[in-house]
Amino acid sequence: MLEASFFQTMLLTFELAGIVTLILLSIGIPLGYYLSQTRSRLKPALEAIVSMPLVLPPSVLGFYLLLAFSPKNAFGAWLDSTFDLRLVFSFEGLIVASVIFSLPFMVHPIQSGFTALPPSLKEAAYTLGKTPLQTLWKVLLPNIKPSLLTGMVITFAHTVGEFGVVLMIGGNIAGETRVASIAIYDEVEALNYDLANQYAFTLFVISFAILLFVYAVNKSMVKSEFK
Amino acid sequence: MITINITKPLHTADGTIELHVERQITDGDFLTLFGKSGSGKTTLLRIIAGLETPKSGRIEVDGEVWFDSEKNINLPPQKRNVGFVFQDYALFPHMSVRQNLEFALKNPQERAKVEEILSIMEITNLAQMKPAHLSGGQKQRVAVARAMVSSPKMLLLDEPLSALDHAMRLKLQDELHALHQRFGITSVLVSHDMSEVFRLSNRVWKIALGAITDDGTPSAVFAGQNISGKFKIVGEVLSIQKSDILYIVEVLAHNEILKVTALKHEIENLRIGDKLLLSSKAFNPILTKL
């Protein structure tokens, strides 16, 4: 019984992190590319918004998201009536909240990856007749693979480790919103130190394995460019 | 025939200046844009390629309008069909030499052309290598080869030899010259190396503070009309020393240091680092077979 709930919670945790990572990858590439290229005066404002989750206490963001998603408020009611979507205390709500909260962890590495590429690469592709999209896909993205990998892994790990936002917006519903970090808190509160340790140690080992993988792969990626 | 008539403000270290060019380039010319950094020569090259937009004016190439500020025409670089060789070569690091060239093909069926260019540039043996593995001179050859693959109307070269050592530079100057002879492609080179200008181009625009101050053959522009020297070398002043009533000027030319005597009026305007033309009218050198 205990085992089943443990696996359920761990599976939910990684499912959330995986979905959030994929969504953020598809947002982070265009957004990071735009930020690396734009000379718009709005750039600092946009960068500040992207970076807000880094400095805000998770509970602040969670609080406002909770208010916004609440069916009692206009936005929440609109979501409910239009899409039949209730984001408070649901898995979907956790996804939306985590996407917002992990945004800088995906956008920053991608943006700096693009910024570090010499502008002549893009210009060379243009003079060779390639469209901006072809250039992005075939020239720029393959050359920032380490940044993409870094962004994906840190986003994944950060989502796994997120606590405040998840607690505020998701609560603690087994099989729906109860992720590992919440479970640890919950078990400690109930003085179930063994179970808390089981969660904590699992997260510890998996996080280490992920980071080890990233650093090992990034090293061989850099090497392969010199083959 | 290329007709250029453009203006563009340039923000330089000495304030804002206006780049203004109103000239024509004849088909098959090898034109060098010569001037100090910040004079606007690279900007002009980038404007021709469509990488920068002039404030106003018009660019017409063989009857096709590439830019016209009045009619709001501005062809993107993709549609101008120019070959551009960047100062840093801009080879795609994740592709092999052959893939870099194949990427430039407009039609993937024309692979034979890649092989042809590889062999003309004598880089067939490098085809499988990644750019990071190539020497500076090899990268430069690949960059020129890639620019030539799509049979461009014009070859634009932005100081392509500036990062190379002297011997490699001379060799590649000869290769660029041979390439130009073979294809007759209209070429525009940005350079601040006078010997390069003499070796490669049949026409030079001297650019200073955004304006073309001289236009003509290299010897007309740099030597002036009044010197009928039978022997000329371009060099750089390394030192000026007084020796009795004469002065000894050390000149760096073709990687060798020459000591030349000079009179007071000759050195009056000379400073260390200046470029000078060394010429002799009655010249009787000793020839020794090596």
Image (cartoon, coloured by chain):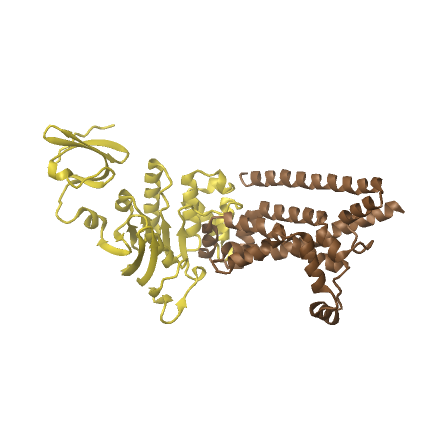
Chain colours: A brown, B yellow
Compared to residue A39, the image places residue B252 above or below, namely above
Image position, residue A148 (x, y; %): 60, 48
Closest to the observer: A148 or A17?
A: A17
The answer to whether residue B281 of the structure is visible from this angle is: no
Is B209 on the left-hand or right-hand side of B130?
Answer: left
Image position, residue A98 (x, y; %): 69, 55
Closest to the observer: A196 or B281?
A: A196
Instruction: Name the residue rendered at 28%, 34% in the picture.
Output: B255
Image position, residue B221 (x, y; %): 21, 50
Image position, residue A17 (x, y; %): 71, 51
Instruction: Name the residue rendered at 76%, 68% in the picture.
Output: A84
Quadrant of the rendered structure where residue B40 is? bottom left
Closest to the observer: A70 or B184?
A: A70
Is B243 on the left-hand or right-hand side of B137?
Answer: left
Instruction: Name the residue rendered at 72%, 50% in the picture.
Output: A163
For the image, the number of numbered tags is: 0
Residue furthest out toward the right: A1
Is A191 on the left-hand or right-hand side of A211?
Answer: right
Instruction: Name the residue rendered at 39%, 70% in the picture.
Output: B72
Is A53 on the left-hand or right-hand side of B104?
Answer: right
The answer to whether residue B137 of the structure is visible from this angle is: yes
Q: Quadrant of the C terminus of chain A?
A: top right
Compared to residue A76, the image places residue B116 above or below, namely above
